[in-house]
Image (tube, rainbow, N blue to C red):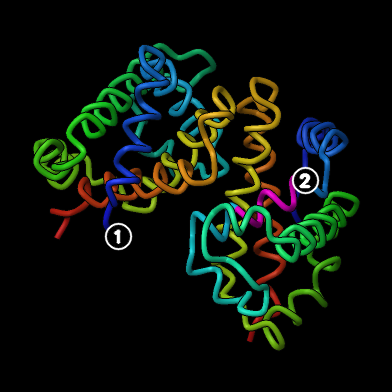
Amino acid sequence: MVHWSAEEKQLISSVWGKVNVEECGAEALARLLIVYPWTQRFFSDFGNLSSPTAITGNPKVRAHGKKVLTSFGEAIKNLDNIKGTFSKLSELHCEKLHVDPENFRLLGDILVIVLASHFGRDFTPACQFAWQKLVGVVAHALARKYH
Amino acid sequence: MVLSSADKNNVKGVFAKIGGQAEAYGAETLERDVMFAAYPQTKTYFPHFDLGKGSAQVKGHGKKVAAALVEAANNIDDIAGTLSKLSDLHAQKLRVDPVNFKLLGQCFLVVVASHNPAVLTPEVHASLDKFLCAVGNVLTAKYR
């Protein structure tokens, strides 16, 4: 089980409390598809992904980004049992979606950058540390049921 | 991974906007990377450093790293040539495991994002990420 210090929990929840899940989620997913274009391979039915502008404005990208980040919120509600929280999602990503777990790490890093851009100086090194740890734990949990 | 001319322009644009702040960004990057990284492995390269908060050694080293990035951006058509000596150093003496360049890159992007969110559009983000990858590749090119 992952240990979270009181400070880490506080840093995570105080940031999360100010996050616009729809906007952040949309931006994180769009940046993933733009910065690492090979990740588009999972979204062939999303329509126009032909340029950064198209990706950013794509309603399916926005909706899916919101979905992904909303799900991420479940981890934050259940910091002491992230493994259990994402057990079924892990199976889904392996068996149905066939997503290489490396992509969870990529999205996690992008999310940290998006948070940094939104929170500026408030996204302190200690904050980054807590969130890098969180995205790492989430990525690990999502990869855990792979076989 | 090849830097297009759009990438090169984006990278030069970032460093132009950062300007004299580059050294400070470098210092903060290293603070985030080495002192606070979720990956304690980065500390193993600095056993001889004071890694406490506000460490002058970490700041100083961050400035060096930033200076190298600026140099690479200013000579973006020949990163390999520009960083050749640094590449030798990393291969023969420092031997920093290649994975760590990605971590440093992540921290640099976080610093740019937190100080200059308007600069880091998705397109610029992509170009800067590619540039940092290219620098990492050059620095590890002679490892074996």
Residue A49 is situated, as x and y percent measured from the top left of the image, at: 58, 66
Residue extending farthest to the right is: A77
Q: Residue at x 67, y 27 (%)?
A: A123
Q: Residue at x 45, y 34 (%)?
A: B108
What's the magenta region?
Answer: A24-30
Q: Are marks 1 and 2 in contact (CB under 8 Å)?
A: no
In the image shown, does B75 or A119 lie closer to the viewer? B75
Tell me the element at label 2: helix
Tell me the element at label 1: loop
Taking the magenta stretch, the answer to whether it contains residue A9 is no
Look at label 2 and name its amino acid. Glu
- Chain letter of mark 1 equals B
Residue B27 is situated, as x and y percent measured from the top left of the image, at: 42, 20
Residue B19 shows which numbered tag? none
Q: Which residue is mark 2?
A: A23
At label 2, counting other C-alpha atoms closer than 10 Å, the crowd grade (few under 14, some 14-19, many 20 or more) is some
Q: Residue at x 41, y 21 (%)?
A: B17
- Chain letter of mark 2 equals A
Q: Which quadrant is the N terminus of chain A positioned in?
A: bottom right
Describe residue B110's horizontal placement relative to residue A74 as left or right: left
Of badges 1 and 2, the one in the foreground is 2
Residue A3 is situated, as x and y percent measured from the top left of the image, at: 76, 47
- Kindly indicate whether the residues beneath marks 1 and 2 are on one polypeptide chain: no
Relative height, residue B1 to residue B12 (above, below): below
Describe residue A64's horizontal placement relative to residue B48 as left or right: right
Q: Which residue is mark 1?
A: B1
CA gap, disc 1 to disc 2? 30 Å
Describe residue B60's horizontal placement relative to residue B111 as left or right: left
